[in-house]
Image: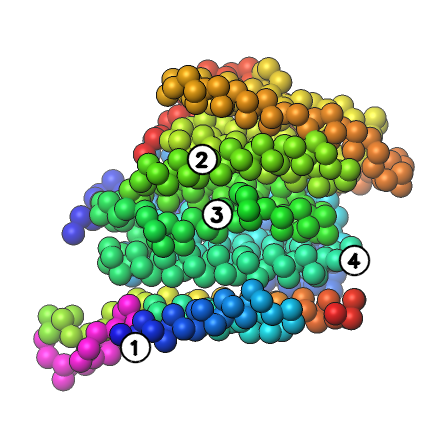
């Protein structure tokens, strides 16, 4: 059997790859112990996320000299051992997630138990992005799901428990089907390690395809599994809103990419998924432009932009899809945090909100502009018909901006009242500014951004 | 053959209850039956006739004989993990149903 991980180069492994997970677990326990003093829980959580950022930045230096590095938990080799793999592509995602995580802490929680839940969520997300194993992908997906059920349910809104419950049941069914498909892959290939699976060239078809892809279709979410997200976000805690609109698409994108990269994907399946993504993008854009509620409009906007990225991904343009996902995460993060904390800006957040809105609609010198031009160019290079369809979809994916801004202007009067801001809110303000600056930096250095994206996420 | 029929029956029954039932507790029971069906199906993937448990004793003989005869332990390990996750999810769902009943009286 081919064992690529037994080569000497791969065994030169930095131990700290796994450290964010361990530190998160340790701090989760400390946070649970210090639960009576809710002030310390928040500080500990903030410390944990700061360490995560520092570790991610150190990891960049390590990966500058090596393409990837991995560790085997307990030195057991697959299929029995767990492999944690750090590549430049998942490091880029972890960096983005690490900075976004600070935003989660900077917004005060309605219940102090949400802080350990946030840590649990990020343990799941880190594990999900770092694992190179199909079964552990399932495990970390379930950890993330369990934490997200909590973030959705622990809100003071009236129907939060109902929305969380109606998210829990289909999520449980889809991830269990993923588990069954993982077991089937083990039955066929005798391994669950992605490296070994890729050498077997297993065709992704029939039940295997539906089982492995359903959880990500549900998380993205693509039509017809999209209704839950609107209900959950409307009833969720602020942290839940942030997760479902800005980080959940990142998870779906990475999950799809991992599956498509390591399995043999039939063309028919790719075209089928691309068609669903295109329909989702158009329908969600129409819904976003007709919705009266700000949060509903924002969720549909997030779904439309995620499905646009997935459209590129399914047609084997993962680099462009990554650029679109980056644009979605940055803009959604800014829009939501400004909506949740409008008092941190003197003008009540209209200007940063407008910048983020125009950015996601495809304003020049922003990542969304580059990704949308990239999608149109890539589709035209395939055929003129596809290019024309891409143009229509891209135009549709920007029609909601007027309605979204109108909804933002009409938000509840009590939210608008300015008051003094604390240290966390000040940090959030700088974080939002940093996100906006990074949007423009990515837009200005668009050639480099394009090249790096293509290198990080090559075609399969 | 029984290794396929029984799990598939459980899957169908579980999915039907989860989809059709209006009572939330019944929905949750349906989900659990569905998950148990999948566990059974995965166990049957790892099963081999006349095999021995995957624990090495000297009485088994040589290591190569053990490897040839022993049942694959990985599906069992996977199910064990899945059962733990399933228990956590069920507990959480029950709390949510309880909270819903407290808030809305549903």
The quadrant in which residue A281 appears is top right
User: Gap between marks 4 and 1, in whole Å?
Assistant: 47 Å
User: Gap between marks 4 and 3, in whole Å?
Assistant: 28 Å
- Circle 2 residues within 10 Å: few <14, some 14–19, many ≥20: many
Residue pictured at 62% horizontal, 41% vertical: A245
- Label 1: chain? B
Contact flag, marks 3 and 1 (Cβ < 8 Å): no
User: Gap between marks 2 and 1, in whole Å?
Assistant: 39 Å
The colour scheme used here is rainbow
Residue pictured at 67% horizontal, 46% vertical: A230
Question: Which residue is more in the foreground, A282 or A332?
Answer: A282
- Label 3: chain? A
Q: Residue A166: in sight, yes or no?
A: yes
Along the horizontal axis of the image, is A286 left or right of A60?
right
* Disc 3 versus disc 2: nearer the observer: 2
* Residue topped by disc 2: A274
Residue pictured at 38% horizontal, 19% vertical: A383
Which element is circle 3 on?
helix
First in sequence, mark 3 or 2: give its number.
3
* Disc 3 versus disc 1: nearer the observer: 1
- Label 4: chain? A
- Residue A216 disc label: 3
* Residue topped by disc 4: A158
User: Gap between marks 3 and 2, in whole Å?
Assistant: 14 Å
Along the horizontal axis of the image, is B67 left or right of A240?
left
Q: Residue B90: in sight, yes or no?
A: no
The quadrant in which residue A263 appears is top left
* Residue topped by disc 1: B2
| Magenta range | B43-63
Answer yes or no: are tags 4 and 1 on the same subunit. Answer: no
């Amino acid at each position: 059997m081919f064992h690529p991980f037994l080569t000497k180069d791969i065994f030169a492994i930095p131990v700290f790859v796994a450290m964010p997970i361990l530190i998160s677990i340790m701090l989760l326990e400390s946070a649970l112990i210090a639960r009576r003093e809710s002030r310390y829980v928040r500080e500990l959580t903030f410390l944990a996320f700061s360490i995560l950022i520092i570790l991610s930045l150190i990891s960049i230096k390590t990966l500058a000299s090596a393409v990837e590095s991995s560790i085997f938990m307990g030195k057991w080799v697959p299929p029995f051992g767990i492999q944690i793999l750090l590549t430049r592509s998942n490091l880029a995602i972890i960096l983005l997630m690490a900075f976004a995580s600070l935003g989660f802490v900077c917004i005060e929680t309605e219940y102090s138990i949400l802080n350990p839940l946030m840590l649990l969520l990020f343990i799941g997300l880190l594990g999900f992005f770092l694992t190179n194993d199909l079964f552990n992908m399932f495990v970390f997906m379930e950890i993330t799901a369990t934490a997200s059920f909590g973030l959705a349910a622990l809100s003071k809104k009236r129907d939060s428990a109902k929305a969380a419950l109606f998210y829990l049941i289909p999520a449980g069914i889809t991830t269990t089907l993923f588990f069954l498909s993982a077991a089937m892959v083990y039955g066929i290939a005798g391994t669950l390690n992605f490296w070994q699976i890729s050498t077997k060239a297993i065709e992704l078809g029939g039940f295997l395809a539906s089982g492995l892809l359903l959880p990500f279709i549900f998380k993205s979410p693509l039509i017809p599994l999209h209704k839950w997200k609107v209900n959950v976000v409307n009833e969720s805690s602020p942290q839940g809103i942030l997760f479902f609109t800005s980080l959940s698409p990142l998870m779906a994108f990475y999950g799809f990419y991992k599956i498509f990269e390591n399995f043999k994907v039939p063309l028919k399946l790719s075209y089928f998924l691309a068609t669903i993504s295109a329909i989702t993008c158009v329908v969600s854009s129409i819904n976003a432009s007709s919705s009266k509620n700000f949060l509903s409009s924002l969720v549909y906007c997030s779904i439309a932009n995620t499905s646009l990225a997935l459209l590129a991904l399914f047609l084997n343009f993962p680099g462009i899809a990554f650029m679109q996902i980056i644009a979605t995460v940055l803009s959604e993060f800014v829009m939501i945090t400004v909506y949740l904390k409008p008092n941190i800006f003197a003008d009540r957040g209209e200007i940063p909100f407008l910048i983020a809105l125009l950015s996601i609609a495809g304003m020049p010198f922003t990542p969304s502009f580059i990704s949308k031009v990239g999608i149109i160019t890539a589709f035209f290079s395939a055929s003129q018909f596809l290019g024309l369809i891409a143009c229509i979809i891209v135009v549709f994916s920007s029609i909601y901006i007027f309605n979204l801004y109108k909804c933002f202007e009409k938000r509840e009067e009590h939210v608008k009242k300015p008051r003094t801001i604390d240290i966390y809110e000040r940090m959030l303000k700088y974080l939002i500014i940093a996100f906006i600056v990074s949007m423009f930096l990515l837009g200005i250095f668009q050639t480099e951004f394009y090249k790096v994206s293509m290198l990080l996420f090559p075609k399969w | 053959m029984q290794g396929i029929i029984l799990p598939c029956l459980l899957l169908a029954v579980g999915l039907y209850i989860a989809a059709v039932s209006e009572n939330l507790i019944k929905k949750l029971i349906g989900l659990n039956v569905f998950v148990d069906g999948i566990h059974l199906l995965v166990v049957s993937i790892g099963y081999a006739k006349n095999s021995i448990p995957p624990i090495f004793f000297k009485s088994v003989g040589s290591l190569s004989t053990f490897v040839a005869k022993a049942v694959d332990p990985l599906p069992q390990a996977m199910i064990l993990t899945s059962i733990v996750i399933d228990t956590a999810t069920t507990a959480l769902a029950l709390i949510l149903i309880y909270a819903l009943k407290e808030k809305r009286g549903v």
